[in-house]
Amino acid sequence: MRYSGWKVFTEGLRGNRGWKALWRDPAPKAEYDAVIIGGGGHGLSTAYYLAKNHGMTNIAVLEKGYLGGGNVGRNTTIVRANYFLPGNSEFYSHSLKLWEGLERELNYNVMHSQRGLINLFHSDGQRDAFVRRGNAMVNQGDDAVLLDREGVREMLPYLDFEQTRFPIYGGLLHARGGTARHDAVAWGYARGADSRGVDLIQNCEVTGIETDNGRVRGVQTTRGVIRAKKVAIITAGRSGQVAAMAGLRLPVESHILQAFVTEGLKPVIDHVISFGMGHFYISQSDKGGLVFGGDLDFYASYAQRGNLPMAEHVMEAGMTLMPMIGRAKVLRSWGGIMDMTPDGSPVIDKTPVEGLFIDCGWNYGGFKAVPASGWCMAHLMATGESHDFAKRFRLNRFLTGDLLDEEGTGSQHNLH
Ligand SMILES: Cc1cc2nc3c(=O)[nH]c(=O)nc-3n(C[C@H](O)[C@H](O)[C@H](O)COP(=O)(O)OP(=O)(O)OC[C@H]3O[C@@H](n4cnc5c(N)ncnc54)[C@H](O)[C@@H]3O)c2cc1C
């Protein structure tokens, strides 16, 4: 079924009885050419591009809960391509280009809104760092504009420009950055994959990975054994646990990241804004809620909720930057499980087990990567070769020391 304004109009006249479920609910088959563990954004986009770009359709996505119930539906929806290091820059640049055509590609409204991202800076040193980053972005072919204090004031007059502790020196504007509706992205890719014949199997937890002589044979699940010559682990915060089923120990720690949303308000914040001196960033959803967050809770956990010290820190930082936020009522908060790598960059690679692939380590920035990650992971699974855009995302870089430390936080990114 194709979605269009005309379809909405005609369905309105017919009492909306013609809409169909977005995907089928198939029973798992005994064998597939490939099985993807994890029905989050990355698992679903991988399935979609395997089918679309490589003609592989005898594949299943196995999701232990419901599609989009993990981090893909829990993030703060920011989409950007403002990376600095070669290896990251071209990957996220490609991802943003895919985002820009995603609604047409999927025939699905993912509410991609390029409202502009402004990273504030508060010292000469920070300005220098952002100038370098902006130059790297422009060299990559993306956009960046350095704003001075007055430039920021013009765009964000509600920030506190009078406080002296963290004076606002300026900001780096990335005009093509913005937001998208997170769960719609999962639904759009799910619908696209299903329509190409991929089986999306929910309530199907993988409990074991079967190997034989160093080769993957399939998976054990709560709905029986499923054979496959290719298996991909794409389980974000649970990657360490799932990889352990194949005897692998990943350089990944799982940490909690929280987010918060206020009651719905009239439009007040047009951009995505990040504070350079405290853990706080914010945007306003199309429903009107102010959506904001900060940093990790700084302890490893598999709980999908956070704790009060970080909640307090985020509120304080928000009040420091824009005191007006104190008038809004927080409606709810939640947490997701982040797969943190030592250098803060992801992994898209083969594993030492033949036929077993892994896509993980997205830390707290994997939502914007969903299109390019699926694109590159599908390429790897179909051809056996790393895609050029993902060739630095190797698993063995933690052995060789060829790290990709984008934020310069050293070898323990989860403690920065
Ligand atoms: C609060 C918060 C804010 C964030 N903000 C941003 C942001 O603004 N921008 C950005 O780019 N990124 C952001 N992120 C990060 C981003 O959401 C994640 O990096 C990304 O969603 C992870 O990939 P995924 O979508 O595939 O993960 P998930 O949606 O978590 O998918 C993994 C899936 O695997 C399934 N699974 C796990 N174990 C098994 C098993 N044994 N068997 C079967 N299935 C299994 C899970 O149920 C889950 O559905 C944020 C994250 C959080 C929590």
Image (spheres, grey):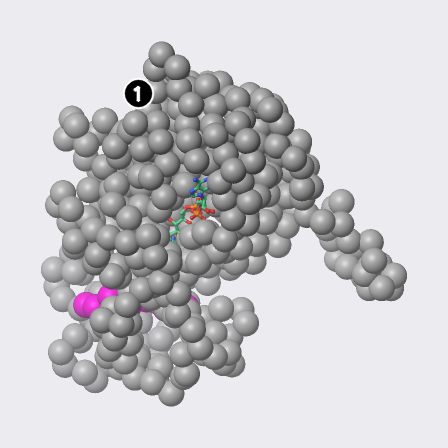
Q: Is residue 107 left or right of residue 342?
A: right
Where residue 358 sits: x, y (%)? 37, 31
The residue sitting at 83% across, 58% down in the picture is 17
**Looking at the image, which is closer to me, 282 or 232?**
232
The residue sitting at 25% across, 75% down in the picture is 312
Tell me, yes or no, whether the highlighted magenta stretch contains residue 279. yes
From what the image shows, is residue 278 above or below residue 268? above
**Disc 1 secondary structure class:** loop
Q: For the residue marked with disc 1, what is the amino acid?
A: Pro
Quadrant of the image containing the N terminus = top right
Where residue 40 sits: x, y (%)? 48, 45
**Looking at the image, which is closer to me, 337 or 90?**
337
Please give the residue where the numbered disc 1 appears in the rendered image. 352
Where residue 124 sits: x, y (%)? 12, 63
**Looking at the image, which is closer to me, 81 or 191?**
191
Q: Is residue 387 visible?
A: no
Where residue 394 sits: x, y (%)? 28, 29
Bounds of the magenta segment: 277-283
Q: Is mark 1 within 8 Å of ligand 1?
A: no
